C-alpha cells in the first residue's frame, strides 16, 4: 500500500517508496534554518554519523541545505535522488523474482546509516493506480522486516511533509488552495515544540489504558475500544537521547509534528467507522464504512467506484493482519488549522482523530502485514470513561 499512497506515515518499512518534493510557499522559506532545525533540534546529528537523505530532483534546494548542514556538523551525508516513474516501471516490467535484489540493497545500508531524512511529495497520487494490486503486494513482501531492523540498529528517522507537503496536486486532493496549504505547512513546521510536547503529555494523561474510549462522528462512526497498556507514543518533532535509548517507535518522527498515538487492544474494539471522504490514489471514495468486531474489519462497504474496487482488491490480496484495527492517533498541533469553512484531512491539527488499519510497526506494534489504510475522522468526539477528550473536533484537555 505504501507505494501508491500520498501519505508517508508507514514509510519506516520501505525507503524505495517515492519521496516527495518540499515546495516553497509564496515567500521562499529559509531552507538553511529549516535544515539546521531538523539536523539539530529534531535529530541531534553528531560528528561522524552517516545521514541518508532521500528526495527527488525538485527537492534540491532543501537537499543542498541539509547536505551542507550535515557536513558542518562533521557528519557524512548520503543523498539519494529518486524518480517514482522509474519505480513504477520496475513494477510493470521487471519480474517479481528480482524484487529481492532491491530489498537486499536496502538491508546492506542499514548498518551504515545512523540517521534517515525523507522528503515527501504528493505531485501524482494516482501514479500507481494502473499497477496490478498483486504486483504491489508481492514487492512489499520483499521489504518485510526492514523497518524492524532499522529500529534495532537505532536509526533515527524523520519524514518532512506528513501529508501536508505544499504542491498543486496535494492541495487539490485536500480541497484547499496551494497557498493555503503552504501557509498551513510552514505554520506547522514553525510551531513551538516545547508547548506541543506539554500538550501531548496532557493528552496522554487524559487517555490512560484502563479507560474505555468511545469515538463518534456526525457521519455515523460509533466505536468503543481501549488502548494497549504502555503504548502511548508521541511525535512531537524531537527525538531525544532518552528516546534513542528506549528505541523502537520512539526513533521516528514526522514534520509538521504533533501527534499522540496508541496501539488498540484488539479484544476491545467494537462498532462502526464511517468515513465520508477517503483519499485513495488521487480519487475520492465516498461513505467508506467499516464494521469492527473483536478488533477486526469484518465488512467494508462504500459507494460504488473504481477506486473502491481497487482498494478492495488490495485488501483482499494482502496477507494476515490486514484486517486489524491497529492504531488510534490524536492531533495536538494548534498551529495547523483548516481554512475557515473547510476540513483538513491531516494527522496533526489539535483535535484531529485518525485510525490505522493493518500494519503498525511504525507505532511499536508487531503487525508487519503489507496492507495499511489511514482513516481520517473530522469532527470526532472522543470520551474516556464518559469524560470528553475531543469534542466535535476540538481538543478538550488541560495543559
Image (cartoon, rainbow, N blue to C red):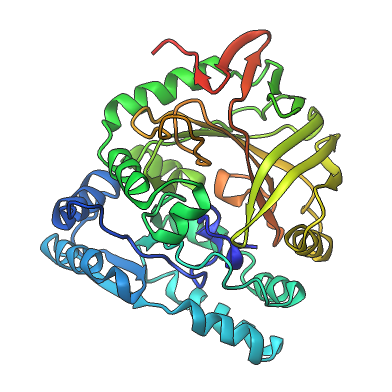
Eyeballing the image, is 246 above or below 169? above
Near-viewer residue (40 or 290): 290
Near-viewer residue (117 or 377): 377
Report whether 141 appears left or right of 269: left
Q: Residue at x 55, y 34 (%)?
A: 261
Near-viewer residue (294 or 58): 58
The quarter of the image holding the C terminus is top left
Residue 140 image point, x, y percent: 66, 70
Residue 262 image point, x, y percent: 59, 33
Eyeballing the image, is 250 above or below 1? above
Eyeballing the image, is 88 above or below 323? below
Eyeballing the image, is 289 above or below 195? below
Q: Residue at x 58, y 19 (%)?
A: 392
Q: How many marks?
A: 0
Report whether 150 appears left or right of 227: left
Outermost residue toward the left in this view: 72
Residue 139 image point, x, y percent: 66, 76
Near-viewer residue (298 or 71): 298
Q: Residue at x 68, y 15 (%)?
A: 211
Task: Tell me which corner region of the image, top left, top right, bottom left or bottom right, holds residue 157.
Answer: bottom left
Amino acid at each position: 500500500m505504501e507505494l501508491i499512497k500520498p501519505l508517508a506515515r508507514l514509510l519506516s518499512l520501505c525507503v524505495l517508496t517515492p519521496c516527495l518534493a518540499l515546495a516553497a510557499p509564496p515567500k521562499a522559506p529559509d531552507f538553511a534554518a529549516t535544515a539546521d532545525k531538523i539536523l539539530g533540534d529534531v535529530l541531534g546529528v553528531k560528528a561522524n554519523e552517516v545521514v541518508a537523505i532521500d528526495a527527488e530532483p525538485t527537492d534540491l534546494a532543501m537537499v543542498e541545505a541539509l547536505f551542507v548542514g550535515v557536513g558542518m556538523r562533521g557528519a557524512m551525508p548520503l543523498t539519494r535522488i529518486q524518480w517514482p516513474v522509474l519505480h513504477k516501471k520496475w513494477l510493470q516490467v521487471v519480474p517479481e523474482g528480482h524484487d529481492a535484489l532491491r530489498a537486499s540493497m536496502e538491508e546492506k545500508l542499514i548498518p551504515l546509516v545512523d540517521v534517515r531524512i525523507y522528503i515527501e511529495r504528493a505531485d501524482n497520487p494516482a501514479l500507481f493506480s494502473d499497477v496490478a494490486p498483486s504486483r504491489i503486494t508481492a514487492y512489499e513482501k520483499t521489504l518485510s522486516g526492514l523497518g524492524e531492523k532499522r529500529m534495532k540498529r537505532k536509526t533515527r528517522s524523520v519524514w518532512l511533509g506528513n501529508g501536508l507537503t505544499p504542491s498543486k496536486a496535494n492541495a487539490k486532493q485536500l480541497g484547499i488552495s496551494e497557498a493555503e496549504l503552504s501557509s498551513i505547512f510552514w505554520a506547522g513546521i514553525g510551531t513551538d515544540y516545547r508547548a506541543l510536547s506539554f500538550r501531548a503529555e496532557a493528552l496522554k494523561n487524559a487517555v490512560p489504558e484502563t479507560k474505555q474510549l468511545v469515538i463518534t462522528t456526525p457521519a455515523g462512526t460509533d466505536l468503543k475500544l481501549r488502548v494497549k497498556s504502555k503504548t502511548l507514543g508521541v511525535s512531537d518533532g524531537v527525538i531525544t537521547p532518552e528516546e534513542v535509548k528506549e528505541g523502537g517507535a520512539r526513533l521516528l518522527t514526522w514534520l509538521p509534528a504533533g501527534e499522540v498515538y496508541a496501539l488498540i487492544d484488539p479484544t476491545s474494539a467494537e462498532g462502526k467507522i464511517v468515513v465520508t471522504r477517503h483519499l485513495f490514489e488521487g480519487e475520492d471514495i465516498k461513505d467508506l464504512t467499516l464494521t469492527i468486531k473483536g478488533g477486526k474489519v469484518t465488512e467494508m462497504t462504500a459507494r460504488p467506484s473504481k477506486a473502491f474496487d481497487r482498494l478492495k482488491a488490495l485488501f483482499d490480496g494482502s496477507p494476515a493482519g490486514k484486517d486489524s484495527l491497529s492504531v488510534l492517533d490524536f492531533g495536538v498541533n494548534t498551529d495547523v488549522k483548516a481554512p475557515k469553512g473547510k476540513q483538513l484531512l491531516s494527522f496533526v491539527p489539535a483535535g484531529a482523530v485518525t485510525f490505522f488499519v493493518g500494519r503498525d510497526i511504525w507505532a511499536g506494534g508487531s503487525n508487519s502485514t503489507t496492507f495499511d489504510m489511514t482513516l481520517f475522522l473530522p469532527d470526532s468526539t472522543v470520551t474516556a470513561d464518559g469524560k470528553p477528550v475531543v469534542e466535535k473536533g476540538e481538543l478538550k484537555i488541560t495543559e
